Amino acid sequence: MRTVTTVNIYEAKTQLSRMVDRASAGDEIVISRNGKPVARLCQLEPGTRTVKFGVLKGRIEISADFDAPLPDDLLAAFEGAE
């Protein structure tokens, strides 16, 4: 069950960790300044991420020698040899 609680900004600053725990459990906390609501602390909805395969098809090209061995001097530089 969702509970809505209103707190002043001083209480929010001193009890922030506890209020974040409550919000993540589903409660809603309204933070007020001088008796006027200014912010709401609530649980985030999980985002949905869609993956579309093939979006770059035909736009990029991988060269035929992509996985060819590196030249000796470049390989030595990666390995820290001088």
Image: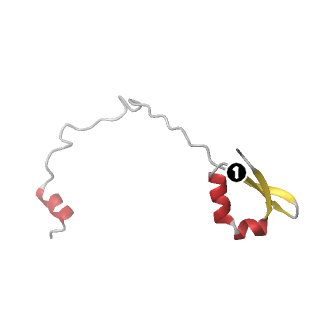
The residue that appears at 23% across and 38% down in the rendered structure is: 63
Occupied quadrant, residue 33: bottom right
Q: Quadrant of the C terminus?
A: bottom left
Residue 30 location in percent, x, y?
Answer: 77, 55
The front one of 81 and 38 is: 38
Q: How is the image coloured?
A: secondary structure
Residue 10 location in percent, x, y?
Answer: 77, 69
The front one of 3 and 35 is: 3
In the visual, does 49 lie left or right of 18? left
Residue 75 location in percent, x, y?
Answer: 16, 59
Residue farthest front in this picture = 1
Residue farthest left in this picture = 72
In the visual, does 31 lie left or right of 57? right
The residue that appears at 36% across and 29% down in the rendered structure is: 57
Residue farthest right in this picture = 35
Name the residue that disc number 1 marks: 27
Q: Quadrant of the N terminus?
A: top right
The front one of 45 and 57 is: 45
Q: Residues within 10 Å of mark 1 (few under 14, many from 20)?
A: some
The residue that appears at 70% across and 51% down in the rendered structure is: 27
The front one of 47 and 3 is: 3
Q: Is residue 25 above or below residue 17?
A: above
